[in-house]
Amino acid sequence: MKFDFTYYNPTKIYFGRTAIDNLAPELEKYGENVLLVYGKASIKKIGLYDKVMEILSDCGKKVVELSGIKSNPTYAQMMEGARLVRENNVDLILAVGGGSVIDCSKGISVSAYCYGDPWERYWINGEQVDNRIVPVASILTMAGTGSEMNGGSVITNEDKMLKNGRVFGPEVYPKFSLLNPEYTVSVPKYQMVSGVFDIMSHLMEQYFSGDDDNTTDYLIEGVLDSLINATRKALKDPEDYEARSNIMWCATLGLNTVTGLSKTQDWEVHMIEHQVGAYTDCAHGVGLAIVSVPYYKHIYKYGIDKFVRYAKKVWGVDTDSMTKEEAALAGIERLAEFIREMGIPTTLREIGASEEMLPLIANSTVLGGGYKILDAQEILDILKECY
Ligand code: NZQ
Ligand code: ZN
């Protein structure tokens, strides 16, 4: 492999139907004040709220709640949580929900005792965290982001019309995460396929970079294969526990840093989607699906061998009688077919974007780790393709 790396991931994962049994013993390791963070209604509907409250009470915890975390969590909600942490001397932030709830909790964790404005310091300037970090733990209810085992925290600043991601170090990762695939059965189909595409996108963002012979790429191909199979099964039978388990674990593997090791990594689809999200508030994975096909059609020529390999290994395209160009495009077409098979929207128009928004959305960050460094005009052209 071309690059050196250090691998360290401190999140303890409890996976399976009885994962919740590990909550009480884990809680014993922290002080008595807990901030419980959750979304709008789902954890109450599935009975998880009552169960978690019962365990917290049995463990003698004093609980403060921050509910109503939005999909695409906001700076205002994060700062409200930071205030609650300070005022209640919180010892542990327990996030129960999807990526938005967990991301918001990590944001609260680093912001509560921040000197100055955390948005400017940590999300805009990328400064190292130099203040007290409040421990976070999670109970995951929706598979997608991988936030349960990483340092990512994507926050939307509504006043500034910016959705920015920050990847914090292992000290901000959840201390432990409970993953019970049964909780994901109640996720509406639209959100489920959005999560699935998010997982695919994380894997592809890492895969489409570099041209070396890298074990990580073989790993990604395997995870994508498992994800595609499991998704088809779960769409047929939403209660298929095996399929739900595979999707959930693919999500965690997709962004717990192991599938990015020694890769330069692209992330351009995510950078564009984050701005799409800031303007439309769309489901993250839906925005990614819309951007992906036009984006890959725009850049495949710059990494054509990898796109041929993707067509062959991930989608089983018989490329023997094809030119490289035909083979690469056949792989991207199979991706487009899978997006349609899952019933995900394929245009920005469908998620409420207007033509006037496109130049504003095009003003997104370019990281430069993929096969082509885009300029603002190219991003606008891609957005017009998506429209
Ligand atoms: O608010 P509630 O009522 O809980 O409903 C949620 C929400 O409406 C619902 N839901 C979650 N679990 C459910 C359920 N509904 C029924 N049953 C359940 N068991 O699903 C909806 C979406 O939840 P959300 O947490 O917003 O979704 P997701 O996990 O996709 O998170 C999206 C956010 O994560 C960021 C995205 O940008 C977006 O802001 N990301 C975080 C990353 C990270 N930390 O590493 C990386 C990603 O690339 C991504 O950017
Ligand atoms: Zn994502």
Image (cartoon, rainbow, N blue to C red):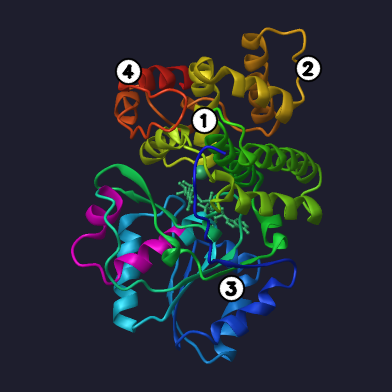
Magenta residues (range): 103-124
Badge 1: few (under 14), some or many (20 or more) residues near its Cα, within 10 Å?
Answer: many
Q: Which mark is residue 377?
A: 4
Q: CA distance from mark 2 to mark 1?
A: 24 Å
Left or right position of 76 against 139: left
**Residue 223: image x %, image y %?**
69, 43
Q: Residue at the spot x=39%, y=57% of the render?
A: 168
Badge 2: few (under 14), some or many (20 or more) residues near its Cα, within 10 Å?
Answer: few
Q: Earlier in the sequence, mark 3 or mark 2?
A: 3
**Residue 182: image x %, image y %?**
73, 61
Q: Which mark is residue 318?
A: 2
Q: CA distance from mark 1 to mark 4?
A: 24 Å
Q: Earlier in the sequence, mark 4 or mark 2?
A: 2
Disc 3, disc 4: CB below 8 Å? no
Q: Earlier in the sequence, mark 3 or mark 4?
A: 3
Residue under pointer 3: 49
SS type, badge 3: helix
In the rendered structure, does residue 116 fall within the stretch colored magenta? yes
- Whether 323 is drawn above or below 370: the answer is above
Quarter placement of the N terminus: top right
**Residue 104: image x %, image y %?**
41, 60
Residue under pointer 1: 210
In the rendered structure, does residue 274 fall within the stretch colored magenta? no
